[in-house]
Image (cartoon, rainbow, N blue to C red):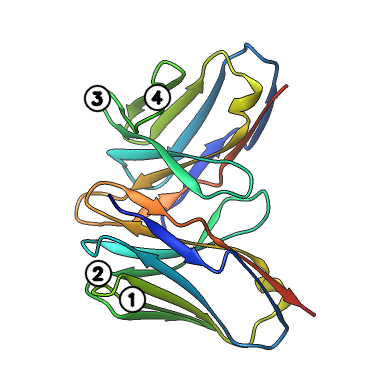
Amino acid sequence: KQEVTQIPAALSVPEGENLVLNCSFTDSAIYNLQWFRQDPGKGLTSLLLIQSSQREQTSGRLNASLDKSSGRSTLYIAASQPGDSATYLCAVRGASKIIFGSGTRLSIRP
Amino acid sequence: GAVVSQHPSRVICKSGTSVKIECRSLDFQATTMFWYRQFPKKSLMLMATSNEGSKATYEQGVEKDKFLINHASLTLSTLTVTSAHPEDSSFYICSARAPVGQETQYFGPGTRLLVL
């Protein structure tokens, strides 16, 4: 049974810092891994999707990596801004379903 | 990218009433849709997989008589919370799988249900 874990559960950093969010999963047989952003009371915003055959994806200040063999993914945010404050969820797609991590609540201090 | 809509975005109802939530894929046909539930400050939990033209597959612990799912067409799935109780208050999100050959799921904006 796939389990997805995100560490840390919460993170607070000053504006401008680079930071890394971690996601680990127990079953390496995945189709893809996706990082989402969720603002309070809102739905999901897809940030980056990494196919199982890929190692990383980049979009602007965001870079996501995937190491299937070790069951890990990281989301790197460069030059953080207060607007980056949100909860970040990783989701792993298996053969039939998507399993979400519990999320990292990120707060960027001005 | 593909768009998935949900209606209503927010609903408040009295205990004992039933509430229907719609999930639509606006610009593609989705043979499979998924329903998720999210409690405050918790992650999304898959409730059921909805296949067009057949019965939904429910995850363990989800009452199928409580949460009725109907995938009436290739662009519409509905979730009906029957005889709602305050503990059913939650954020419900649907997603739709893109056509065969694509592995991406597109997520709706969610519906916040508050049962008084």
Residue bearing the label numbered 3: B54
Residue bearing the label numbered 2: A52
> Residue B69's mark?
4
> Which chain's residue wears label 2?
A
Residue B37 in the image: above or below residue A38: above
Q: Nearer the viewer, mark 2 or mark 3?
A: 2
Q: CA distance from mark 2 to mark 3?
A: 30 Å
Q: Tell me which residue sits at (22%, 74%) in the image.
A: A53
SS at badge 3: loop
SS at badge 4: strand
Are the two marked residues, 2 and 3, in contact with CB atoms closer than 8 angstroms? no
The answer to which of marks 1 and 2 sits earlier in the sequence is: 2
Q: Tell me which residue sits at (39%, 47%) in the image.
A: B27
Check disc 2 and give the amino acid type. Ser
Are the two marked residues, 1 and 4, in contact with CB atoms closer than 8 angstroms? no
Tell me if mark 3 has few (under 14), some (14-19) or many (20+) residues whose alpha carbon lies within 10 angstroms of its own. few
Tell me if mark 1 has few (under 14), some (14-19) or many (20+) residues whose alpha carbon lies within 10 angstroms of its own. many
Of B32 and B38, nearer the camera is: B38
